[in-house]
Image: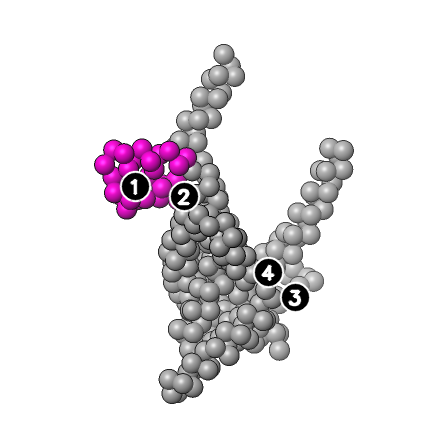
Amino acid sequence: MKTYSKVYLTVIFALLYAPIVVMMFFSFNEGQSLAVFSGFSLKWYKEFFKDSVAMNALWNTFLLAVLSSLISTLIGTFAALGIDRMRNKKLKNAVMMGTNLPMVNPDIVTGISLMLVFVFIGRIMLFDHALNFWTLLIAHVTFNLPYVIMSVLPKFKQMDKHLVEAALDLGCTPTQAFYKVELPSITPGIMTGAIMAFTLSLDDFVISNFTSGVDFQTLPMYIYSMTKKTVKPDMYALSTLIFIVIFILLVIINLPSKEERAIKKKKGKRRSV
């Protein structure tokens, strides 16, 4: 069984990462061919940084991803706190169902519905352009929120409730107890939710395509516009850089903290004894 499980994992990881490895390999190709490696070169990395339209799209994408992840993380953390404090089980289940629904809802349905809402409000408010950067930001915050809530909420359930009660008994106000006791306990969930929101916003195309204006273009939309002709190899270089940055972030986040290291050392000493 162990042999079969290893083979299965190898096949799965090969299917997941083989396309990325091929893309990274040919991003250093001197020519444009995806069949012949004509020589190692950083040509396409230089070409990308010279492309002002691509750089502007990259800046727009990162600006949108950072802002939407920060806003959705802030709102989602307090939403998770509110859900955790609910005592009415029926209401709590209804809220949880409403929270989970956007995650299983197709992106095209979410994109079209948000577009209709923004256009309707824009017509009422007599805006010249109903869709712009702000509608795109609201759309990204909307679809990021459920993921942040689902990342933070389990941390509230795992936390020892007696610690909060002890803090209140020792003179802390509910606000002080939250910031001094609860917030440090749920920080890993907050970081996970923030990274997930950032990557989802960075990657989104369908919802962005329906809710963005003509004066704001994200990187996925720019790359999609290139597919009508051909995708230039400098996009392979950009994708490689994004993959490396995300990979480094995930490694940093998953590094064990000092407390976890101390716990592992104690367990190791106990086993040796």
Magenta residues span 160-188
Is residue 217 visible in the rendered image? The answer is: yes
Q: Is residue 182 magenta?
A: yes
Please tell me which residue is depicted at 68% across the width and 62% down the height of the picture: 36
How far, Cα to Cα, is label 3 from label 1? 60 Å
Which residue is disc 1 drawn over?
Answer: 177
Q: Residue 186: which numbered mark, if any?
A: 2
Q: Is residue 202 magenta?
A: no
Could you tell me if the residues under marks 3 and 4 are in contact, i.e. CB atoms within 8 Å?
no
Display coloring: one colour
Q: Residue 33: which numbered mark, if any?
A: 3
Which residue is disc 4 drawn over?
Answer: 104
Of marks 2 and 3, which one's residue comes earlier in the chain?
3
How far, Cα to Cα, is label 4 from label 2? 25 Å
Question: Which circle, 1 or 4, is nearer the viewer?
Answer: 1
Could you tell me if the residues under marks 1 and 4 are in contact, i.e. CB atoms within 8 Å?
no
- Find residue 93 and report its horizontal and vertical position in percent: 52, 53
Question: Which circle, 3 or 1, is nearer the viewer?
Answer: 1
How far, Cα to Cα, is label 3 from label 4? 39 Å
How far, Cα to Cα, is label 2 from label 3? 48 Å
Q: Amino acid at mark 2?
A: Ile
- SS of the residue under disc 3: loop
Please tell me which residue is depicted at 40% across the width and 31% down the height of the picture: 259
- Find residue 18 and report its horizontal and vertical position in percent: 66, 52
Please tell me which residue is depicted at 40% across the width and 43% down the height of the picture: 186
In the image, residue 252 above or below residue 96: above
Of marks 1 and 2, which one's residue comes earlier in the chain?
1
Of marks 3 and 1, which one's residue comes earlier in the chain?
3
Q: Amino acid at mark 4?
A: Val
- In this rendered view, identify the residue nearer to me: 213 or 15: 213
Please tell me which residue is depicted at 35% across the width and 34% down the height of the picture: 163
Could you tell me if the residues under marks 2 and 3 are in contact, i.e. CB atoms within 8 Å?
no
